Image (cartoon, grey):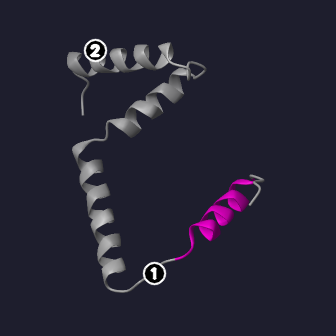
C-alpha cells in the first residue's frame, strides 16, 4: 500500500502530539510502531475482529482458557524478563 499525502499529514500530527506529551522519549522507529498499532490496515483490523469473535465463541462454548498470570509468566520467561508476582 502506497503512502498518501493524507497518511503523511496524519502521521505528522500523531508524532507531534505524542512528542509534546510526557512520553516524548521515543525513537522514530518506536513512533512508527505506535502509529501502526493505533492505525491498523483494514486487513489487520478484520483479522483482529475475527480472532476476538473466535475467542468469544470459545468462551461461549465453555472453554475457559488459561489464567492470565500463567501466560504472563511464560512470556516473561521466554523474553528473559524478571517480574514480581
Q: Position of residue 72 (x, y in %)?
A: 63, 62
Taking the spot 28% from the left edge, 20% from the top edge, the residue there is 10
**Going by the image, does 80 lie left or right of 44?**
right
Q: Which mark is residue 9?
A: 2
Looking at the picture, tell me which residue is in the foreground, 67 or 52. 67
**Quick check: 56 above or below 16?**
below
Q: Quick one: quadrant of the N terminus?
A: top left
**Quick check: 8 above or below 34?**
above
Q: Identify the image quadrant of residue 46.
A: bottom left
Q: 10 Å neighbourhood of mark 2: few (<14), some, or many (≥20)?
A: few
Magenta segment, prevailing SS (helix, strand or loop): helix
Taking the spot 64% from the left edge, 70% from the top edge, the residue there is 70
Q: Position of residue 75 (x, y in %)?
A: 64, 60
Taking the spot 32% from the left edge, 64% from the top edge, the residue there is 51
Q: Position of residue 68 (x, y in %)?
A: 57, 67
**Going by the image, does 25 lie left or right of 30?**
right
Taking the spot 42% from the left edge, 13% from the top edge, the residue there is 16
Q: 10 Å neighbourhood of mark 1: few (<14), some, or many (≥20)?
A: few
SS at badge 1: loop
**Quick check: 4 above or below 65?**
above
Q: How many marks?
A: 2
Q: Identify the image quadrant of residue 49.
A: bottom left
SS at badge 2: helix
Q: Residue furthest bottom?
A: 62
Q: CB under 8 Å between callouts 1 and 2? A: no
Pick whichever of labels 1 and 2 is earlier in the sequence.
Answer: 2
Q: Which mark is residue 64?
A: 1
Magenta stretch, residue numbers:
66-80
Q: Position of residue 5 (x, y in %)?
A: 22, 15
Q: CA distance from mark 1 to mark 2?
A: 44 Å
Q: Quick one: quadrant of the C terminus?
A: bottom right
Amino acid at each position: 500500500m502506497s503512502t498518501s499525502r493524507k497518511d503523511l499529514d496524519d502521521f505528522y500530527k500523531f508524532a507531534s502530539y505524542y512528542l509534546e506529551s510526557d512520553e516524548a522519549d521515543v525513537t522514530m522507529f518506536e513512533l512508527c510502531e505506535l502509529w501502526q498499532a493505533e492505525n491498523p490496515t483494514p486487513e489487520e483490523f478484520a483479522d483482529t475482529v475475527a480472532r476476538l469473535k473466535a475467542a468469544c465463541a470459545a468462551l461461549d462454548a465453555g472453554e475457559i482458557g488459561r489464567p492470565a498470570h500463567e501466560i504472563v509468566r511464560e512470556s516473561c520467561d521466554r523474553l528473559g524478563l524478571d517480574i514480581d508476582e
